[in-house]
């Protein structure tokens, strides 16, 4: 039985990707050096002590020049600096709430350097194939990331600086992902073929599997060789430990996974165990939603699996029901004690009992000073797990028990309508073909990157 643990978090948006930076030329190393006044030099080449009154034994305190950035690695002539690593690492730490132990931080630093080397190789190979990414397109993607944080680009740039990173580094990551994706479309996808018979075979298997379980899976794939397998397995276990402590699975997948799904936080989509390698299939069937398992030995490396959701193949799932809801909420003033909050919550709960259907929700809300918000077309599956079972078992016009916290206040949901899901249909032939093609492109892309690593000239500091 594979080790399974439950992370104490739900997945956060893929927008929380870690950031990358790479200085574009060695000229940047000297930026910021200030001019100094001319000094009198004696015949022996020393500075006149009469003018500066320098001590004979000089002790240097701190860095001699904070503007100098020594190369951590040089990849085919392209410099990766310690600053690049620091800025990427800063975002990983931020995505995990700033709670990373010193030992884990050093392990992350090593992995970040590997990622930057791979990214540099990908960008260089794309350029060698005359693939260029328009800076305007990179800027548009950056603005979308900023919007996910509900900030303007200038605000987001200031935020990144406070976290020890920069806008240039996240733009570098965006450029790398776009360049590698386009290179795959040019050099790999045209040579990947999926026949009609293969698609039909998948459809037949789906129909035969109707009613069986399928899972929405997240994966982190780490390649390994016999020489470094022990180290990779140790890294995988450390990743699990950090996720278990509240780290973000998508953030770790984006930074560490070597699969093409890294760009979407490791999300494999909906799969049946039969579609997975036997090792992963066994793990998935033993897991519950919200659990992570691994490291799992697979061909060429190890994988970590995260079960995001579960449903029945070609079967309508009650959690796909669409609800119309009213939310009544009361926010506690700042400084409210636990006892005061409990008393107000009790008053709120007593008032809620008067609600007889959604028609009375606004009236009751006005009496107790609650904010009332309408929410239509809310899928049960998208709600917090604690509320899903409650909402599936109450009728139209009924309310959930009060829930909340001292920080968020207390609230209830009133069910105003429910649209049950229709019977699920098999994915169409185009969807199945696209999935099969993506799997094959992903496998060939790993081999492509492996060959780039073998041919690269890399100097380490």
Image (tube, helix red, strand yellow):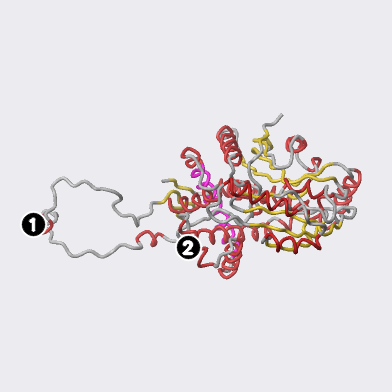
Circle 1 residue? 50
The quarter of the picture where the N terminus appears is top right
State which region is magenta: 108-132
Residue under the image location 55 percent in, 34 percent down: 231
Residue under the image location 54 percent in, 59 percent down: 170
Circle 2 residue? 158
- x, y (%) of residue 184? 67, 57
Report the residue that reaches farthest toward the bottom: 136
Residue 121 belongs to the span the image colors magenta: yes
Front in this rendered view, residue 257 or 442: 257
- x, y (%) of residue 202? 86, 48
Pointer 1 with pointer 2, Cβ within 8 A: no
Relative to 383, 333 lies left or right: left
- x, y (%) of residue 8? 63, 42
Residue 430 belongs to the span the image colors magenta: no
Q: Which mark is residue 458?
A: none
Query: SS class of the residue under badge 1?
Result: helix
Q: Is residue 458 above or below residue 370?
A: above
Residue under the image location 56 percent in, 65 percent down: 151
> Which numbered disc, 1 or 2, marks the residue closer to the eye?
2
Pointer 1 local density, CA inside 10 Å: few below 14, some 14–19, many at least 20: few
């Amino acid at each position: 039985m594979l080790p399974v643990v439950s992370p104490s978090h739900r997945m956060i948006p893929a927008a929380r990707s870690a950031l990358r930076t790479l200085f574009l030329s060695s000229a940047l190393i000297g930026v910021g050096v200030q001019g100094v006044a001319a000094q009198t030099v004696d015949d022996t080449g020393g500075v006149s002590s009469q003018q500066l009154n320098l001590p004979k034994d000089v002790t240097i305190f701190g860095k001699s020049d904070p503007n100098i950035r020594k190369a951590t690695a040089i990849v085919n002539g392209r410099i990766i600096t310690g600053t690049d690593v620091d800025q990427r690492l800063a975002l990983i730490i931020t995505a995990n709430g700033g709670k990373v132990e010193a030992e884990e931080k050093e392990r992350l630093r090593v992995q970040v350097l590997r990622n930057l080397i791979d990214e540099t190789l990908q960008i260089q190979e794309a350029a060698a194939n005359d693939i260029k990414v328009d800076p305007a397109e990179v800027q548009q993607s950056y603005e979308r990331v900023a919007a996910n944080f509900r900030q303007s680009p200038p605000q987001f740039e200031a935020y990144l600086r406070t976290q020890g990173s920069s806008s240039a580094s996240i733009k570098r990551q965006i450029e790398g992902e776009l360049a590698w994706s386009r290179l795959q479309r040019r050099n790999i996808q045209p040579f990947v073929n999926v026949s009609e018979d293969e698609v039909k075979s998948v459809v037949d298997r789906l129909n035969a599997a109707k009613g069986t379980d399928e899972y929405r899976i997240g994966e982190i794939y780490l390649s390994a060789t016999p020489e470094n397998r022990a180290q990779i397995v140790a890294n995988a276990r450390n990743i699990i430990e950090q996720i278990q402590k509240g780290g973000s699975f998508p953030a770790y997948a984006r930074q560490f996974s070597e699969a093409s799904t890294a760009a979407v936080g490791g999300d494999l989509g909906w799969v049946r165990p039969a579609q997975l390698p036997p090792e992963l299939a066994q793990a998935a069937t033993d897991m519950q939603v919200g659990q992570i398992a691994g490291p799992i030995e697979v061909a060429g490396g190890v994988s970590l699996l995260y079960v995001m959701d579960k449903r029945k193949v070609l079967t309508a799932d009650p959690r796909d029901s669409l609800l119309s809801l009213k939310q009544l909420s009361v926010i506690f003033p700042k400084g409210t004690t636990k006892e005061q909050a409990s008393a107000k919550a009790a008053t709120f709960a007593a008032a809620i009992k008067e609600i007889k259907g959604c028609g009375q929700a606004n009236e009751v809300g006005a009496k107790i000073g609650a904010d009332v918000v309408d929410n239509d077309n809310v899928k049960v599956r998208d709600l917090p797990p604690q509320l899903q079972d409650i909402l599936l078992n109450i009728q139209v016009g009924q309310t959930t028990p009060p829930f909340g916290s001292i920080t968020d206040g207390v609230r209830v949901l009133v069910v105003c309508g429910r649209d049950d899901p229709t019977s699920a249909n098999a994915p169409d032939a185009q969807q199945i073909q696209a999935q099969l093609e993506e799997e094959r492109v992903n496998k060939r892309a790993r081999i492509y990157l492996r060959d780039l690593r073998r041919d690269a000239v890399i100097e380490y500091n």
